[in-house]
Amino acid sequence: MMNAKAGKLLRPADVVYDHVKRRIMMNEYKPEFVLTELGLAHEIGCSQGTIREALLRLQEDGLVTRTARRGTVVTRLTAEEAQEMLVLRRLIETRGAIEAARKVNKAQLAEIAALRERMDEAAAQRNEYALMEADTEFHLAIFRASGLDALEQILARCIKHSHRWKIWAPSHKRALSKTAARHDVLIERLAARDGEGLAEALGRHIDTIVKIPGAKRGEA
């Protein structure tokens, strides 16, 4: 059960992880949906041990919750929780922006530019999930340049959950090409090493990811 991704062979557990993660992120496995090792093993065609390894990784991402009583369930996400995630995400990313603009190097800028190109490719293919993945890596790559390593895993969780909310938010409407283009100003500020400008642009970017009922978040 090996698959090629970015020129590398994936382990079976990686393939399972990607499969289940995609279905969760795209709302095919809805919040509080019960995932069983045996059921997934039959569906995907692999061992329960492989499923278990993938589910443990998804638990680390905060996408599933494993309990003795209910087993493994897709993590719920309410409007209130989504808003709190966006507030936390905004705080972490804007604070990291100053350091990222100061410390970013040419190799990191090249990586970030390549991720931006991946967004255009995904948008052209109308592949929302691929765009989401490139978007996540893009934001994490900028934050990684800040050197605030202890916060990266927390930020990664916030980004994943904000993407989940965006998928099913009823008021969210934006063409994939426009979603990709929204990141151009972030690259411009970063390349100019304008930390204050990057922080401001990131704040505006996060504030307008999606409209949340009852919140004044600007243009969506």
Image (cartoon, rainbow, N blue to C red):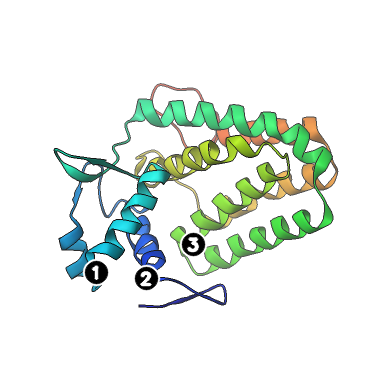
The residue at which mark 2 appears reads as 12
The residue at which mark 3 appears reads as 130
User: Amino acid under label 2?
Assistant: Pro
The mark lying in front, picked from 3 and 2, is 2
Q: Residues within 10 Å of mark 1 (few under 14, many from 20)?
A: some
> Reading the chain from its start, which is encountered first: label 3 or label 2?
2
x, y percent for residue 59: 35, 45
* Vertical relation: 121 (above or below) 66: below
> Reading the chain from its start, which is encountered first: label 1 or label 3?
1
Circles 1 and 2: CB atoms closer than 8 Å: yes
User: Amino acid under label 3?
Assistant: Ala
The residue at which mark 1 appears reads as 47
Q: Is residue 12 left or right of residue 113?
A: left
x, y percent for residue 139: 62, 46
x, y percent for residue 166: 42, 43
Task: Give the SS element for disc 2.
Answer: helix
Camera-side residue of 49 and 32? 49
Q: Is residue 220 visible?
A: no
Task: Give the SS element for disc 1.
Answer: loop
The image quarter containing residue 143 is top right
Spatial separation of the CA atoms under disc 3 and disc 2:
20 Å
The mark lying in front, picked from 1 and 3, is 1
Residue at image location 59% in from the left, 60% down from the top = 119
Q: Which mark is residue 11?
A: none
Spatial separation of the CA atoms under disc 1 and disc 3:
27 Å
Camera-side residue of 199 and 142? 142
Q: Residues within 10 Å of mark 3 (few under 14, many from 20)?
A: some
Residue at image location 67% in from the left, 36% down from the top = 148
